[in-house]
Each structure stands twice: as structure tokens, then as C-alpha cells.
Image (tube, grey):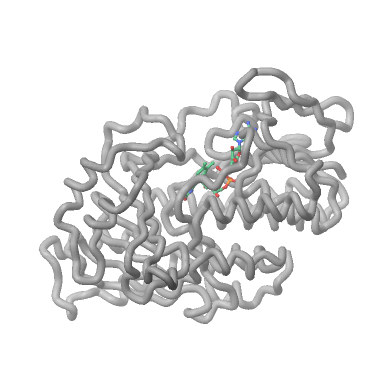
């Protein structure tokens, strides 16, 4: 079966590796001219790392990443109220990794060039349209900057893995409304700083009105004792609805410095961290309403093209990786393409819909608002409602598919 993938991001490349490993004839067509290490930090949860392990990638990723040991929550005064172990430190068979998106992307790109071959990965090929004739599909790719046709490719299946502004999705749902804006804007950056806590913790500070997520994405450097720290500020800004969704849009740091001026705690100095960051990127936090169907004829959707979600609960890349595994398995185990795509849709649409909707309700981060509402001026240790917090965290893990018992019972296969 000849399969073409539109979009060589995290989801597209992992899908290519899964399909290739299972004997499919697969090609990837990426819009940009040159693959570059873009973005800032990203998290890979144990259920996705299981698939990366199956692909033989987890040792290589571990070299570039931090195996996250703990997740901690604190209020806007820096008072810690929740701590839980993560990944292998919590008894999962697989790690949770925090890694630079660009480093991960380049690693996947190089692995694809090496295993699929250079003649299977095309850059500067922007997917524009397709048509189905008889039992084949014909896709057209253009040189985006020149608007010139680059290639017309025949295939049995087209996978649209072309991200939050997906052309494939637009072709399948031409009348779908605009992206849904959350009312919050994310500001993201990285800085080389001394490690905080145990040098392997992810910290969530504040509430949904004004939040800061901080986690290291590289090991501590021996020569300087410093570590690359990733941060994401989440600020309520209703007026930002019309701003462009471009992961690489840079902004000035002055207003953030003013906003976080009092956030210097004995275990982390948020203000200094923003000050020490070279570039700051803006992204109006958005998603789309879940779809009832991803697969039509010889076309299907995957990753952010299928289910863009708020980056809460570390699930964006992880869910794309789960899609890749589910689609490959469905193709392996069904006699017809139609049956395989039906299985893929019926497995992955309900699962990702739940995560999209749960993230709109703040996902696990709802414990931050709970603490802010109950203790706006801070709390005494004995006032922390541990059982209530425990219940919220447990429920999210079940929804997102990384409930420990269920996951640990799985083999390291698709
Ligand atoms: C440049 C960039 C930076 C990002 N930075 C972050 C970050 O810092 N933190 C975070 O949580 N998430 C970030 N993301 C999003 C994150 O990678 C995804 O949410 C997640 O990994 C799911 O992956 P995906 O492959 O579905 O989408 P993406 O990773 O967005 O990949 C989509 C790919 O499709 C390509 N593409 C788009 N349109 C076409 C087309 N018509 N034809 C062919 N190719 C096309 C894009 O260039 C891109 O490579 C970033 C995405 C991008 C593209």
C-alpha cells in the first residue's frame, strides 16, 4: 500500500516511522524548505514513550531530554501544595520526557532520512489539494513561496498531519468555523539558569488567570552548573482573539516582566528567568471543536490537524504519537482500507475528544483555580484538601490514557 503524509512535524514523522517499520511504502511531504529546530519545550508522557521505545528511539531521546521525576503545583506566592512522582519515578514502565521540541523534531527527521531514505522525505512540498479517481488518490503539492506545482503524487492513502492550520482538514470540512480562542495567551521562552528543586521537576505556579509552567529540558551542564529551563506563561487576555496562530511569533518581554515582578520565591526566581530569556514567543491558546469523522475515502487526519488541543496536561505531541500507533495497527489488522480507517476513527476520535474537552475545563490544572479560589491569600499546610486534589489528578490520567495499571499491562508493541 502506498501512503503519503502531508506534514513532517512530530506526528507526521512518527507515523512515517511506524508505517515503515510495518512494511508500508510511505513518503512524507513537508511544507517548509528546511527543517529547523523550532519551538521550545515539549513533554512526552509514558503512553507515548512506550511507542517511541517500540520504534527504538527512547534511548536517543533520553540523551537530549530530562526524564521528569516530579510534578509540583504552587500558588502565586510560591507555596507548594501538590507533588507527585512522574514516569518511571512513579512506577510506570516508561519515562516522561521533557525535551526541546526542535531537538526532538531534528532527531525524528534524521531517523526518517536514515531509515526511510532521503528519496522518501520531501521538503518545500506544501500540500494543496487532492482528488480521488477510481481506486487511487492524486495529491498536489506546491512550492509555497512561488505558488508553483512541485509534484502530483499517486497514492492509496493520504494522511493529513499538517498541524493546527491544516489544509487537509479545510478540504474535508470547508465550512468549519474559525479556530476557537480560549481567552488566554501563552508566552514561551527558555533560559540557562541554575537548576531548581531536584533539577528534574515540572512546576505549575499560580492559577488560570496568570500561570507559569517551568521545567528543565536538558541535563545540567557540567562546566557551568547551569541548565536549559523552559517556561510557559499563561495570561488571561480576552482581546487577543484575532492574533495569528504562529508558533514562531516573537514578542517583547517588558510587559511580562511587569506582570511577574513579585514572583521571586526561595526555590525559583520567575522574574529573573524571564529577564534571562533571549527570545519570547507568543501563541494565543486555541483549539477546534472535535470532529465527528476524520476519514473520508482515501484521506484521514492525524495529530493537531485532527484534534488541536490546549497545551495543558502535556498531551499535544503525545496524542499525535498515539494516533500514529493506532492507525498503523488498524491498517495491519483489517482486510480493507475502509475497515481500517473506520477502526482508527472509532478508537481515536472518542479518546482525543475527551482530552480536548477536558483541557477546555482546565484539565489537571483545575487544582490551581481550586486553591486560588479557596485560599486567595495563601494557606496553612494542614488546610490543603489532599483527597480532593488526588481525585482530580487521577481522573485526568484515566481520560488521557496514561492510567498506570492499564498502561503497564501493555506490551512494547503497537
Ligand atoms: C514550528 C512549530 C513550533 C512549535 N512549538 C511548540 C512548542 O513550543 N510547544 C508546544 O507545546 N507545541 C509546539 N508546537 C506544536 C506541537 O509540535 C504539536 O502540537 C504536536 O507535536 C502535534 O504534532 P503535529 O505533527 O500534529 O503538528 P505540528 O508539530 O504542528 O506539525 C505540522 C507540520 O505540518 C507542516 N505543514 C503545515 N501545513 C502543511 C501543508 N499544507 N503541507 C505540508 N506540510 C504542512 C508544518 O510545517 C509542520 O511541520 C509547534 C509546532 C510547530 C510547527
- Asked if residue 330 is positioned above or below residue 252 in the image, the reply reads below
For the question of whether residue 295 can be seen, the reply is no
Q: Kindly give the residue lying farthest to the front in the view shown.
A: 223
Which part of the image, by quadrant, shows the N terminus? top right
**What residue do we see at 46% from left, 29% from top?**
178
Residue 109: give x, y in percent of width and height: 67, 50
From what the image shows, is residue 278 above or below residue 50?
above
Q: Nearer the viewer, residue 259 or 86?
A: 259
Check the image and name the residue furthest to the top: 147
**Residue 319: x %, y % from top left:** 57, 55
Question: Percent x, y for residue 5?
Answer: 72, 40
Query: In the picture provided, is 153 more to the left or to the right than 391?
Result: right
Work out whether 331 lies above or below 296. Answer: below
Quadrant of the rendered structure where residue 366 is?
bottom left
Quadrant showing the C terminus: bottom right
Residue at x-position 52% and y-position 68%: 96
Q: Is residue 275 visible?
A: yes
Q: Position of residue 66 (x, y in %)?
A: 49, 68
Q: Quadrant of residue 124?
A: top right
Position of residue 317 in the picture relative to residue 123 (left or right): left
> How many labels, in total?
0
In depth, the one of 138 and 175 nearer the eye is: 138
- Is residue 344 shown left or right of residue 259? right
Ligand 1: give its quadrant.
top right
Which residue is at 73% across, 47% downward?
Answer: 342
Amino acid at each position: 500500500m502506498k501512503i503519503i503524509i502531508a506534514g513532517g512535524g512530530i506526528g507526521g514523522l512518527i507515523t512515517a516511522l511506524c508505517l515503515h517499520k510495518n512494511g508500508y511504502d510511505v513518503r512524507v511531504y513537508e511544507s517548509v524548505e528546511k527543517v529547523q529546530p523550532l519551538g521550545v519545550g515539549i513533554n512526552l508522557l509514558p503512553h507515548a514513550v512506550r511507542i517511541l521505545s517500540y520504534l527504538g528511539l527512547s534511548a536517543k531521546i533520553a540523551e537530549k531530554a530530562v526524564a521528569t521525576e516530579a510534578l509540583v503545583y504552587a500558588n502565586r506566592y510560591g507555596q507548594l501544595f501538590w507533588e507527585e512522582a512522574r514516569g518511571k519515578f512513579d512506577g510506570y514502565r516508561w519515562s516522561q520526557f521533557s525535551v526541546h521540541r526542535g531537538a526532538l523534531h531534528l532527531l525524528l527527521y534524521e531517523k526518517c532520512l536514515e531509515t526511510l531514505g532521503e528519496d522518501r522525505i520531501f521538503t518545500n512540498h506544501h500540500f494543496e489539494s487532492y482528488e480521488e479517481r477510481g481506486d487511487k488518490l492524486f495529491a498536489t503539492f506546491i512550492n509555497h513561496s512561488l505558488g508553483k506545482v512541485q509534484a502530483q503524487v499517486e497514492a492509496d492513502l493520504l494522511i493529513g498531519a499538517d498541524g493546527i492550520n491544516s489544509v487537509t482538514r479545510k478540504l474535508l470540512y470547508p465550512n468549519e468555523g474559525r479556530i476557537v480562542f480560549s481567552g488566554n495567551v501563552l508566552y514561551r521562552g527558555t533560559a540557562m539558569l541554575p537548576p531548581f528543586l531536584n533539577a528534574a521537576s515540572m512546576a505549575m505556579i499560580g492559577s488560570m488567570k496568570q500561570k507559569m509552567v517551568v521545567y528543565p529540558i536538558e541535563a545540567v551542564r557540567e562546566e557551568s552548573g547551569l541548565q536549559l529551563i523552559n517556561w510557559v506563561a499563561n495570561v488571561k487576555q480576552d482581546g487577543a482573539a484575532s492574533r495569528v496562530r504562529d508558533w514562531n511569533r516573537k514578542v517583547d518581554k517588558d510587559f511580562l516582566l511587569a506582570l511577574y515582578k513579585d514572583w521571586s520565591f526561595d526555590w525559583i526566581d520567575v522574574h529573573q528567568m524571564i529577564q534571562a530569556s533571549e527570545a519570547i514567543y507568543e501563541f494565543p491558546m486555541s483549539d477546534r471543536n472535535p470532529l465527528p469523522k476524520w476519514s473520508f475515502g482515501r484521506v484521514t487526519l492525524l495529530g493537531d490537524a485532527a484534534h488541536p488541543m490546549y497545551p495543558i496536561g502535556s498531551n499535544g505531541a503525545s496524542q499525535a504519537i498515539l494516533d500514529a500507533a493506532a492507525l498503523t495497527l488498524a491498517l495491519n489488522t483489517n482486510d480493507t482500507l475502509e475497515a481500517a480507517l473506520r477502526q482508527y476513527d472509532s478508537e481515536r476520535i472518542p479518546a482525543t475528544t475527551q482530552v480536548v474537552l477536558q483541557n477546555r475545563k482546565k484539565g489537571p490544572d483545575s487544582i490551581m483555580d481550586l486553591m486560588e479560589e479557596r485560599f486567595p491569600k495563601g494557606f496553612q499546610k494542614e488546610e490543603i484538601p489532599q483527597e480532593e486534589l488526588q481525585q482530580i489528578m487521577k481522573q485526568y490520567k484515566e481520560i488521557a490514557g496514561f492510567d498506570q495499571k492499564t498502561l503497564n499491562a501493555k506490551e512494547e508493541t503497537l
